[in-house]
Image (cartoon, rainbow, N blue to C red):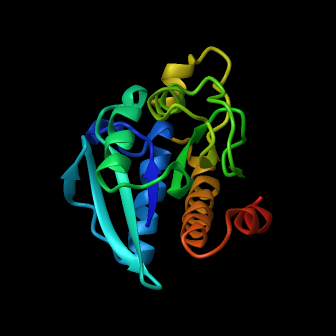
Amino acid sequence: MKLIVGLGNPGAKYDGTRHNVGFDVVDAVARRLNIEIKQSKANGLYGEGRIDGEKIFLLKPQTFMNRSGESVRPFLEYYNMEVEDLLVIYDDLDLPVGKIRLRQKGSAGGHNGMKSLIAHLGTSDFKRIRVGVDRPAPGETVVQHVLGRYRPEEKDAISEAIDLSAEAAEAFTKKPFLEVMNTFN
């Protein structure tokens, strides 16, 4: 079994914001794999499917970003899954819009959703895809930036990054992650 988690905030007012790019990628994976995300468990919306006989779960925690671990850990426990089966997708201020970076493990890097995951899972050794949303513009706070929408000139780049991240997430279900990293980094 594999679990692909996209981090974001629930509710229509957050749709299309930088902070919700994890949700956007999971939605793109769902379209690619023809999985409907409409079931509820562990404070999250999820869908399930199969690839080459292996069960795949897609999860969008509904706990708000800063409490994502409160959804992911119970979901893993319910299905008796290991952290090695987990891939987390989230926004990253330190990467330019449109850039993605895959890692096998790492720190939270100041990201509160990742801090919550690390605290609840008791480890930072889980796979992740960081999707660049760039730094705030001068005079813009981090909160304004991540809860804001993309500028028109960024839309093509973020759309491509979402598609590429979805492709990488699908590859995670089929290949060793080191191979996936070598392909997509």
**Residue 125 vertical position relative to residue 52 in the rendered view, above or below:** above
Q: Is residue 149 visible?
A: no
* Rendered-image quadrant of the N terminus: bottom left
Q: Position of residue 164 (x, y in %)?
A: 62, 65
| Residue sitting nearer the eye, 113 or 82 | 82
Residue drawn 34% across the image and 74% down it: 49
At 63% across and 46% down in the image, what residue appears?
130
The furthest residue to the bottom: 52
Of 33 and 179, nearer the camera is 179
Residue 105: percent from the left, percent from the top? 68, 43
Viewer-closest of 132 and 103: 103
**Vertical relation: 159 (above or below) 11:** below
Q: Is residue 2 above or below residue 102?
A: below
Asked if residue 164 lies left or right of residue 96, the reply is left
Does residue 50 appear to the left or right of 10 in the view shown?
Answer: right
Q: Quadrant of the C terminus?
A: bottom right
Q: Residue 151: x, y in percent?
A: 56, 41
Tell me which residue sits at (29%, 64%) in the image: 47
Count the labels in the image.
0
- From the viewer's perspective, tell me whether residue 71 is left or right of residue 117: left
Residue 152 drawn above or below residue 10: below
- Residue 133 position, x and y percent, is 62, 40
Q: Is residue 185 in view?
A: yes
Residue lying at the far front of the rendered structure:
80
